[in-house]
Image (spheres, rainbow, N blue to C red):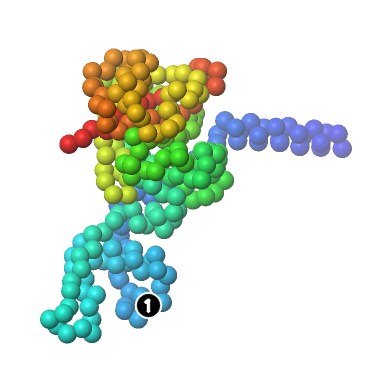
C-alpha cells in the first residue's frame, strides 16, 4: 500500500514539474488572410434569417468595396447606390467585442490582436477567446479610449519563457536590434498607425512611467523624461501634440520589474 502511494506521489510530482517546464502553446488567433476567405454569399431568403452581426459581415466580405443597391422596390429615378468598404476586423469583433486592434513588430514574434477589458486584471489570465489561459492576452489599459483618441496609450503583455506574447521585447535590450527595429505598427479599427521607439528601459512597476491621466498637458516634457530613462539615446523630437505609446511587460532582473518600451506616433 505504501509503495503504491509512493509511486503515485512520484508520478504526480513528475507530472507537475513537466507541466511547469513544458507549458502548452497559447491558442492562436487566425490572421486576417486566413479568415477573409468566406464561403459564397447565402441566398436572399437565408440572409433574412441570419443574426445581424453575421449578415453585416457577409455583406462586407461579398461586396468587396463595390456598390450595393438598398433601394429595391423604389422607382428607378429614386434609387440610390450605397458603397460599403469592407472592414477586415469585423470577424474579430464577432469573436470578441473587446477587440480593439492588432500589434505587429518586425523582427519579433509579436503579431497579436489587442483587446480592452473593463479592468486591467481579466486579460492577465484569460485569452482572446475569453478562455482561462496563463498566457493571457495582449490588452490595452481599460482607461484608454483607443483608436487614436488618447495622448498616451498603454498596452500590456506577459513575458513568457516560451517566447510567446511580449517575450520578444527582450530583444530590445540589445542595442543593435534596437537600432534596426525602431518601428511598431498598430492597426486599430479604422487606421494603421506607426510608432517610432524613443525609449527602452527596465524599472519598477512605477506609475511615473505610464502617466495615468492619459491627457498630457506637458507631452513634450514627459516624452523627454522618458527619453532620459532610456538605455539608448534618441534623437526624436517630441512635439507638444505628440501621441505616445507605452508597451509594458515583466522583467525578472528587477524586483517586481518591468520592461518599458515607449514610442511616439509617426505622422505623415
Q: Which residue lies furthest to the right in this view?
A: 1
Quadrant of the rendered image containing residue 153? top left
Position of residue 82 relative to residue 128, above or below, is: below
Res 265 → quadrant: top left
Q: Name the residue under label 1.
A: 48
Q: Tell me where residue 131 appears, x and y as whole percent.
A: 54, 49
Which residue occupies the foreground of this view, 184 or 267? 267
Q: Which residue is drawn at 38% across and 66% down?
A: 54
Q: What x and y, as percent, mark residue 137?
A: 47, 41
The residue at the point 32 percent across, 78 percent down is 43
Residue 164 sits above or below residue 200 on the image:
below
Quarter in which the N terminus is drawn: top right
Residue 45 in view of the camera: yes
Left or right of 181: which side holds 116? Answer: right
Say which element carries label 1: loop
Furthest residue toward left? 77
Q: List x then y, in percent, for residue 213.
A: 43, 32
As drawn, the residue found furthest toward the front would be 217
Quadrant, the C terminus? top left
> Who's the residue at 44% across and 54% down the image?
97
| Residue 151, quarter of the rendered image | top left
Q: In this view, does 45 lie above or below 32?
A: below
Amino acid at each position: 500500500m505504501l509503495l503504491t502511494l509512493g509511486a503515485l506521489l512520484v508520478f504526480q510530482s513528475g507530472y507537475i514539474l513537466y507541466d511547469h517546464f513544458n507549458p502548452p502553446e497559447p491558442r492562436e488567433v487566425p490572421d486576417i488572410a486566413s479568415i477573409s476567405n468566406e464561403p459564397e454569399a447565402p441566398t436572399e431568403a437565408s440572409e433574412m434569417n441570419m443574426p445581424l452581426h453575421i449578415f453585416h459581415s457577409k455583406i462586407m466580405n461579398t461586396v468587396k468595396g463595390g456598390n450595393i443597391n438598398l433601394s429595391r422596390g423604389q422607382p428607378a429615378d429614386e434609387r440610390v447606390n450605397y458603397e460599403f468598404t469592407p472592414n477586415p476586423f469585423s470577424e474579430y469583433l464577432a469573436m470578441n467585442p473587446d477587440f480593439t486592434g492588432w500589434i505587429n513588430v518586425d523582427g519579433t514574434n509579436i503579431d497579436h490582436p489587442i483587446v480592452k477589458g473593463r479592468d486591467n486584471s481579466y486579460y492577465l489570465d484569460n485569452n482572446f477567446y475569453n478562455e482561462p489561459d496563463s498566457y493571457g492576452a495582449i490588452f490595452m489599459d481599460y482607461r484608454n479610449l483607443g483608436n487614436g483618441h488618447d495622448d498616451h496609450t498603454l498596452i500590456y503583455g506577459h513575458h513568457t519563457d516560451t517566447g510567446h506574447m511580449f517575450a520578444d521585447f527582450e530583444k530590445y535590450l540589445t542595442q543593435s536590434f534596437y537600432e534596426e527595429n525602431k518601428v511598431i505598427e498598430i492597426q486599430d479599427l479604422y487606421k494603421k498607425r506607426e510608432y517610432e521607439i524613443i525609449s527602452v528601459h527596465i524599472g519598477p512597476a512605477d506609475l511615473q512611467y505610464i502617466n495615468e491621466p492619459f491627457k498630457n498637458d506637458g507631452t513634450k516634457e514627459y516624452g523627454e523624461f522618458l527619453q532620459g530613462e532610456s538605455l539608448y539615446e534618441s534623437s526624436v523630437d517630441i512635439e507638444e501634440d505628440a501621441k505616445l505609446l507605452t508597451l509594458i511587460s515583466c522583467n525578472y532582473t528587477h524586483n517586481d520589474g518591468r520592461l518599458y518600451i515607449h514610442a511616439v506616433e509617426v505622422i505623415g
